[in-house]
Image (tube, rainbow, N blue to C red):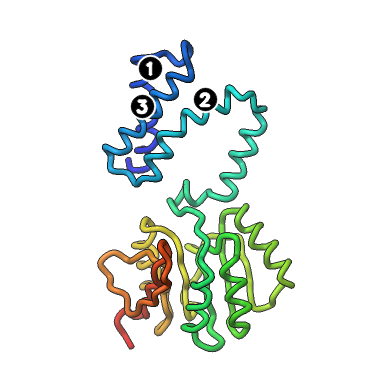
């Protein structure tokens, strides 16, 4: 039901606006009224601020673009690009985040010599390449299953001279054996963190690390915290397998 909340909210706002103005009679007025109702419903639902804004602007923006006479193929192209880059936001509720430069520096200081490191969800490959340059002794695997993001990561890898110790794969990290790594780095969202924890507990090698950028594992206190100093990317949270060991 949670995944249907947003389309149902939009549908309810559409019907509510229709009570006052028919969309065919005055599309601009109907869209403005729908946007106001959608924003109000999002506020009453206690959604985050950016989601309230998105709900309020979605239909008005669509009506405005329609009136601008943009060719239909442009919408198809935009949809395909959105799916290619952000499929995980739709399927797994994991937006495309890009790790800050400070993350690579902190990881470079913390990871052991010659470690095998998995970046579970590498996006455009920025962090993996930064870490590869900072720590050429590491054996890095960066996985991304959104094809558009993987393509960007692959192009970055090619542009960096195809570093041999960095492998970039287009597949889901859920199917990867985490027991083959000394450290697993994730920068996902709150939604998958319980599942991430279960996989780490079930498959992680003894002494291996789970490192999460900012997002916590519910009810599981990390063994270490490394501050990042950013307003959004605040700290690296580190758990050792088995949890609590030294």
Work out whether mark 2 precedes mark 1 in sequence or the reverse, and give the earlier one: 1
Residue at the spot of label 1: 18
- Where in the figure is residue 95, as x and y percent of width and height? 47, 53
Residue positioned 57% across, 45% down in the render: 83
Q: Residues within 10 Å of mark 1 (few under 14, many from 20)?
A: some
Residue at the spot of label 3: 13
- Where in the figure is residue 161, as x and y percent of width and height? 74, 72
Relative to residue 221, is residue 115 depicted above or below?
below
- Quarter of the rendering occupied by the N terminus: top left
Residue positioned 58% across, 72% down in the render: 141
Q: Secondary structure at mark 1?
A: helix
Q: CA distance from mark 2 to mark 1?
A: 15 Å
Question: Disc 2, disc 1: CB below 8 Å?
Answer: no
Residue at the spot of label 2: 63
Q: Secondary structure at mark 3?
A: helix
Q: CA distance from mark 3 to mark 1?
A: 8 Å
Q: Which mark's residue is nearer the viewer, 3 or 2?
A: 2
Q: Is residue 4 left or right of residue 149?
A: left
- Where in the figure is residue 33, as x and y percent of width and height? 38, 23
Relative to residue 175, is residue 40 depicted above or below?
above
Work out whether mark 3 precedes mark 1 in sequence or the reverse, and give the earlier one: 3
Q: Is residue 112 left or right of residue 72?
A: left
- Where in the figure is residue 233, as x and y percent of width and height? 43, 65
- Quarter of the rendering occupied by the C terminus: bottom left
Q: Secondary structure at mark 2?
A: helix
The picture quadrant where one finds residue 169 is: bottom right
């Amino acid at each position: 039901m949670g995944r249907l909340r947003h389309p149902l909210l939009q549908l309810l706002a559409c019907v509510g606006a229709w009570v006052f103005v028919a969309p065919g009679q005055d599309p601009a007025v109907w869209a403005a009224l729908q946007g106001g109702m959608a924003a109000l419903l999002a506020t009453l639902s206690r959604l985050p601020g950016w989601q309230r804004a998105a709900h309020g602007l979605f239909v008005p923006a669509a009506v405005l673009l329609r009136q601008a006479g943009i060719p239909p193929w442009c919408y198809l192209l935009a949809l395909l690009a959105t799916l290619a880059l952000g499929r995980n936001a739709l399927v797994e509720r994991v937006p495309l985040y890009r790790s800050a430069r400070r993350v690579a520096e902190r990881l470079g200081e913390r990871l052991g010599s010659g470690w095998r490191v998995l970046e579970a969800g590498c996006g455009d490959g920025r962090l993996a390449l930064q870490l590869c340059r900072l720590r050429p002794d590491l054996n890095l695997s960066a996985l991304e299953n959104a094809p558009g993001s993987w393509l960007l990561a692959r192009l970055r890898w090619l542009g960096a001279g195809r570093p041999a110790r960095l492998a970039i794969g287009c597949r889901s990290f859920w199917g990867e054996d985490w027991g083959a790594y000394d450290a697993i780095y994730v920068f996902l969202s709150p939604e998958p963190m319980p599942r991430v924890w279960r996989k780490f507990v079930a498959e992680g090698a003894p002494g291996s690390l789970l490192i999460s950028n900012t997002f916590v594992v519910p009810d599981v206190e990390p063994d270490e915290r490394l501050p990042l100093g950013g307003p959004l990317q605040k700290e690296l949270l580190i758990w050792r397998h088995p949890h609590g060991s030294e």
